[in-house]
């Protein structure tokens, strides 16, 4: 690839953005509906929304200063871990179609000892909600044991201290 | 394909079975976990359960005497239609892994005017529940308008009259 | 969504870019590897590359001035049509992993009467090729009949006249 | 689950069958086209065939006496390993649709030192080919190093000695 060609650094919005305005703090990620996301009914297949929400959560975590691979490798923590979905209550409100541009909005609703409950809303091209889910994820070690959220991760989700999650020792809590 | 080769007729259990015993009437469908269903965490990806449940619902409908393509074509009804997921409340109870054989069990919980609420349970290799969802699907015409469930479809879901769904005029209700 | 929130117009690179420099004219699209794209081997599942290439082709077409939905609706043409994959020769060169940022590059190799042959290369985070495919797609009407590529579509793929594909009557060729 | 309910043992054809008749030795696996496999064009999405072929290869290996998880765990060998796709030349011959029952046929074309080349054919409901691919897979250790195929795996693919792959020490070759 020539050095004139785009590099990852050239796609500044690839992980979406964290926005904090009068409607609250949230992560937003644009999603394009491709053929892979649709079905023979001519609309986006319902499980596609589940995948899109996972992209939103992953990129929210990334912008908070940690990412899934670092957790899995254990390089962001004392032991390898991952956020695992425990519960997902989904409303499929309106259909979406091939070529639509959607936005996944992810907000923190509640922090538990080892869990985070999020509200994830998919917004359609006309600005109306097309999907909404309440999602509870749990931080789980490779062994299967739930792990307490570190102070740093809690602060990051709270918006209090987002920049420091990966600081030395931060994730150990 | 030589006439010694298998034909669709040779795979009698491909659509699962409807069972009606002391634990109630339900459709059961075996599912194998393949690489496509897993993720880098080493377990089945959470959206895979959503796809498996849709397979269970589709094959339940098929064994009730109608199938998705006939509905979409309109050949089973006066106008093209499809069952669309409106709500899905999911509990991810235990992880499953590559090569596991699971069973998707689908039961009718409640029939509404245009909707059916189902309980779908995924059973792991050791017989324990690994996933459970309450799913509400709505019969929707191509135009987007919800359609009243015909008497025949209602009877089929109820188990009262499963064999007659495709009988002449049956789906028109 | 408040009017301060991002809108589709705020994500300028969502469809990638067409680049025309000393290494040739091509479409580039960034791809993030998410959990949905990986498998229990810890790497991106091989069919994910096939999906990513389809995203690249779809967005290349979009930036050329037409898009898949307009073709399917027939609104960009005299009859509904779609580009369908006829042949795909794929080399899986190196594994990629969760959280990697990849680039899909799509170049026109050859234009046939009803077909386009493309070279699609996926570039890894270190700038090396991880996947390459030669892909032949055919423009097919809803009836299944291959359609001759219009002069406008041919010019757009050639780079001669990319801006005019959707001009009045252009796609009719 | 009551003991009257189906168990994995009750689905004898879940992994397909190995057939050896006048048209040659091959693995056959039935595939149902579900909504998840289709796209807004109304036909099976092209990457679905790639997933179906992987199911065929995985179940062929399983019936040969080894399976993907044992390889990955290292329990079938001296070190964890997996078959990885290196090359795939695909012809998409005819479209298939929702509810179709297809058959994936997998034959060994050639055995290399660390690789196996297979011909995989998808047969449509009318017995005609709808897809065909030549696929080369390589046995790769977790470290990324290609591994020589053991004598036992070679014999199993050849059909000479299928039952003994997992016998003591067999996979070490």
Image (cartoon, coloured by chain):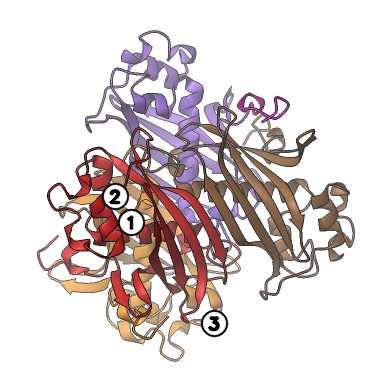
Chain colours: A orange, B purple, C red, D brown
Asked if marks 3 and 2 touch (Cβ < 8 Å), the reply is no
Residue at image coords 57%, 28%: B23
For the residues beneath circles 3 and 2, the answer to whether they share a chain is no
Is residue C124 one of those drawn in magenta? no
Q: Position of residue D97 (x, y in %)?
A: 45, 34
Tell which of B109 and B80 is nearer to you: B80
Q: Secondary structure at mark 1?
A: helix
Residue at the top extreme, as displayed: B168
How many numbered marks are there?
A: 3
Q: Which residue is mark 3?
A: A78
Q: Chain of mark 1?
A: C
Q: Which residue is mark 2?
A: C68
Q: Position of residue D25 (x, y in %)?
A: 77, 41
Residue at image coords 31%, 21%: B149
Asked if marks 2 and 1 touch (Cβ < 8 Å), the reply is yes
Q: Residues within 10 Å of mark 1 (few under 14, many from 20)?
A: many
Q: Which residues are magenta?
A: B1-12
Q: Which residue is mark 1?
A: C58
Q: Position of residue D98 (x, y in %)?
A: 45, 34
Tell which of A19 and D132 is nearer to you: D132
Tell which of D35 and C67 is nearer to you: C67
For the residues beneath circles 2 and 1, the answer to whether they share a chain is yes
């Amino acid at each position: 690839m020539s050095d004139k060609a785009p590099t990852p650094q050239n796609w500044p919005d690839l992980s979406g953005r964290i926005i904090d305005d009068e409607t609250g703090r949230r992560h937003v990620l644009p999603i394009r509906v491709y053929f892979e996301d649709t079905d023979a009914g001519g609309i986006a297949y319902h499980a596609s929304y589940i995948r899109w929400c996972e992209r939103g959560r992953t990129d929210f975590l990334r912008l908070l200063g940690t990412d899934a691979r670092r957790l899995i490798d254990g390089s962001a923590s004392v032991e390898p871990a991952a956020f695992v979905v425990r519960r997902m209550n989904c409303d499929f409100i309106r259909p979406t179609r091939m070529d639509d541009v959607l936005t996944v909005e992810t907000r923190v609703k509640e922090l538990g000892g080892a869990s985070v409950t999020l509200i994830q809303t998919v917004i359609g091209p006309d600005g109306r909600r097309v999907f909404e889910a309440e999602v509870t994820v749990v931080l789980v070690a490779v062994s299967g044991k739930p792990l307490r959220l570190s102070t740093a991760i809690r602060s990051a989700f709270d918006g209090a201290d987002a920049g420091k999650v990966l600081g030395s020792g931060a994730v150990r809590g």
